[in-house]
């Protein structure tokens, strides 16, 4: 009996203990981008605060200033930017499948890869920027610039800084698309790059919806 117990203890001691489960840590790139976007949110919150503060102290400027805005044109431009977020997310879905390019014909959208969806996103984003530049030119022709009055200053600063962010996103899309073409193997790093740029693009989209509502819609 003692010998059997000793033998059992010897077998138990010689059996390796089960390995501890691996800890799933968050992706540091994604966390860094989210933290950075939080700081950008504070920046745009300051722009909103500036807009409402100046509007409260100079309400007369808001009786004539908004009349110069081309709301239908800006609505179409806003729709273009909103749609681009859908194209961006379709590209993310393809990246998560590790599919960098299409596997079917050019019109087989269900077989498009990340590159095709991101190129379409880039085109729509570029159209938005061009539309914003055209709007600035039209307003300047009507006499509204950043130096005209307080309304012109807050309008150009709020929408202009957002336009700069959209332009930065377009550069980031070019980098992600170029990296996918240069990579011999589309893996986790390339997919992560696609995911984090989508965070940024959706953020820019949501901020513009807020700006459009406040500047163009809210009376």
Image (cartoon, rainbow, N blue to C red):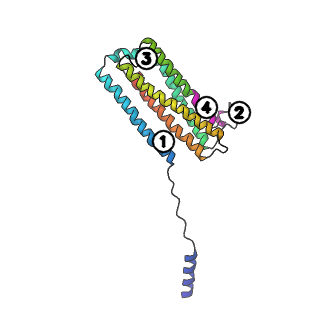
Marks 3 and 2, how far apart at CA: 42 Å
Q: Main secondary structure of the magenta part?
A: helix
Residue for badge 2: 105
Position in image of residue 163 (x %, y %): 48, 27
Residue situated in front as seen by the camera: 7 or 60: 60
Which circle marks residue 119 in the picture? Answer: 4
Q: Is residue 121 magenta?
A: yes
Q: Which mark is residue 33?
A: 1
Vertical order, 35 against 141 (above or below): below
- CA gap, disc 1 and disc 4: 22 Å
Residue on which the image places disc 3 = 69
Extent of the magenta region: 103-123
Residue appearing at x 41%, y 12% in the figure:
143
| 30 falls in the magenta region | no
- Contact (Cβ within 8 Å) of mark 2 with mark 4: no
Q: Are marks 4 and 3 in contact (CB under 8 Å)?
A: no
Q: Is residue 149 above or below residue 52?
A: above
For the C terminus, the image quarter is top left
Residue 52 in picture, x, y percent from top left:
33, 26
């Amino acid at each position: 009996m003692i010998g059997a117990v000793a033998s059992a203890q010897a077998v138990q001691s010689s059996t390796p203990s089960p390995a501890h489960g691996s800890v799933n840590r968050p992706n540091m790139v994604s966390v860094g981008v989210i933290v950075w976007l939080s700081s950008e949110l504070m920046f745009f919150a300051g722009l909103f605060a500036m807009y409402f503060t100046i509007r409260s102290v100079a309400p007369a400027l808001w009786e004539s200033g908004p009349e110069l805005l081309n709301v239908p044109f800006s609505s179409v431009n806003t729709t273009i930017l909103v749609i681009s977020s859908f194209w961006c997310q379709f590209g993310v879905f393809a990246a998560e499948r590790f599919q960098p390019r299409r596997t079917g014909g050019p019109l087989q959208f269900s077989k498009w890869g990340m590159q095709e969806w991101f190129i379409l996103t880039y085109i729509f984003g570029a159209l938005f920027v061009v539309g914003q530049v055209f709007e600035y030119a039209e307003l300047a022709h009507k006499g509204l610039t950043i130096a005209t009055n307080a309304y012109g200053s807050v309008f150009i600063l709020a929408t202009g800084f957002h336009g700069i962010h959209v332009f930065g996103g377009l550069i980031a899309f070019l980098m992600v698309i170029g990296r996918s073409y240069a990579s011999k193997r589309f893996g986790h790093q390339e997919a992560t790059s696609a995911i984090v740029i989508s965070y940024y693009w959706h953020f820019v989209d949501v901020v513009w919806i807020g700006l459009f509502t406040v500047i163009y819609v809210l009376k």
